Image (tube, rainbow, N blue to C red):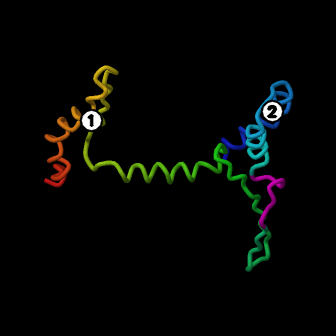
Amino acid sequence: MVGNLFLQNILRAYFPGYSSKHGLPLKHLKAADALMSCRTEEQGHSLYVCPEDNTPLQINHSCRHRSCPACAARKQAQWLNQQQQKLLPCGHSHMVFTLPTNINCFGNTILRGLARPYSGLVRRPCWNC
């Protein structure tokens, strides 16, 4: 939340002058507007009342914009967790082969030939041994 307030203060102070000097696409203007108004009265609010002592609690609504540090942090954490669940439970490497253009037409044949020796590892994973 602190990061969002810091960004909001910068946008509120400098974005109007910047946007008036530079022609910005509508999507950038909408994004800046959403970030500047996130968790403020402009977005609206919900009012909760404690049933014991009737203390009111007002919670301002968020912008839910994907560029907002406060709103996107939870989705980013969920995505990161999902990606980590997909990782193999052992050390591994990712290999990328770039073939020269003149032999690119043979690429699938070459890769199939390389994949045969390694296919046994996929069928019988070594980390369960």
The answer to whether 109 appears left or right of 2 in the picture is left
Q: Which residue is mark 2?
A: 15
Q: Does the CB distance between marks 2 and 1 fall below 8 Å? A: no
Where residue 49 appears, as percent x and y from the top left, is 77, 73
**Looking at the image, residue 101 lies above or below residue 96:** above
**Mark 2 or 1: the one toward you:** 1
- The amino acid beneath tag 1 is Asn
Local SS, label 1: helix
Q: Nearer the viewer, residue 106 or 71?
A: 106
Give coordinates of residue 60: x percent, y percent.
Answer: 77, 58
Q: Identify which residue, 44 or 93, lies in the foreground.
A: 93
Residue sticking out furthest to the bottom: 52
Asked whether the viewer can see residue 10, the reply is: no
Q: CA distance from mark 2 to mark 1?
A: 51 Å
Residue ID at (76%, 71%): 48
> Is 126 contained in the magenta span?
no
Asked if residue 41 is among those painted magenta in the image, a careful observer would answer: yes
Residue 118 position, x and y percent, is 17, 41
Quarter-wise, where is residue 97 in the image? Answer: top left
Sequence-first tag of 2 and 1: 2
Query: What residue sits right under mark 1 in the picture?
Result: 108
Q: Is disc 1 surrounded by few (<14), some (14 to 19) or many (20+) residues within 10 Å?
A: few
The picture quadrant where one finds residue 28 is top right
Q: Which residues are magenta?
A: 39-46
Q: Is residue 17 left or right of residue 67?
A: right
